[in-house]
Amino acid sequence: MADEATAHEVEKEETRYTVAVVTVSDRCSRGEREDASGPALVSLLGEHGYDVVATRVVPDDLRQIMATLQALVANDVALVVTTGGTGFSPRDVTPEATEAVCERMAPGIPEAMRAASMAITPRGCLSREVAGLVRGTLIVNLPGSPKAACENLSAVIEPIAHGLRMLRGGAADCASLS
């Protein structure tokens, strides 16, 4: 069992995945408000060993969100996290854009994030975030507030690394997790 744990730790240390952070906000895209969620996520992802290769700020526009996601997938980014546009506002269309781009959905990720969020606030159930796969990229939607975005991502960041190993063709034995 110790050999399995050691092998898991070595694999974890050697694997660095690329990530892009996309902030979806009309006001941030127009320069009316400073983006706080994007930089908070960049910091969190860096602390967990991800190589942040791109950050983008786009308005709450279905076509622009889709085009941004498609461009990042075309650049072979392993993980794309979006922040914003997951609520009930009529302009909140990030989940719809993500679903339109993805080939397969990964419902367990947003389910886990909502469960963790519900332990903090009853409003956690209002998030419409989704996660999905397209080619070798995992796209994960997060809420727009810096606190909620980081809390949600922290709830799933370890399983995401394991999922990326599987998605990107690495060794990933689900039974060897200790």
Image (cartoon, grey):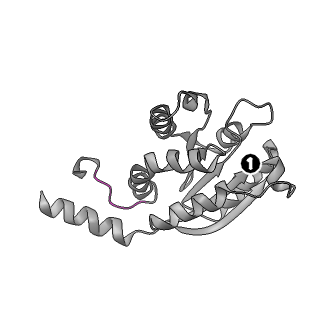
Q: Quadrant location of residue 98? A: top right
Identify the image quadrant of the N terminus: bottom left
Residue 2, compared with residue 154, is above or below; it is: below
Q: Quadrant location of residue 32? A: bottom right
| Residue of label 1 | 66
Q: Is residue 171 magenta?
A: yes
Residue 34, compared with residue 134, is above or below; it is: below
Q: Main secondary structure of the magenta part?
A: loop
Side of 140 relative to 12 (left or right)? right
- Residue at 28% across / 52% down in the picture? 173
Question: x%, y% of residue 153?
Answer: 51, 49
- Residue at 44% across / 46% down in the picture? 155
Side of 30 relative to 168 (left or right)? right
Kind of element beneath mark 1: helix
In this picture, which residue range is highlighted in magenta?
A: 169-173
Side of 24 relative to 52 (left or right)? right
Question: x%, y% of residue 122?
Answer: 53, 27
Question: x%, y% of residue 174?
Answer: 29, 48
User: How crowded is the residue under tag 1: few (<14 C-alpha within 10 Å), some, or many (20+)?
Assistant: some
Whether residue 115 can be seen here: yes
Side of 31 relative to 178 (left or right)? right
- Residue at 68% across / 34% down in the picture? 87
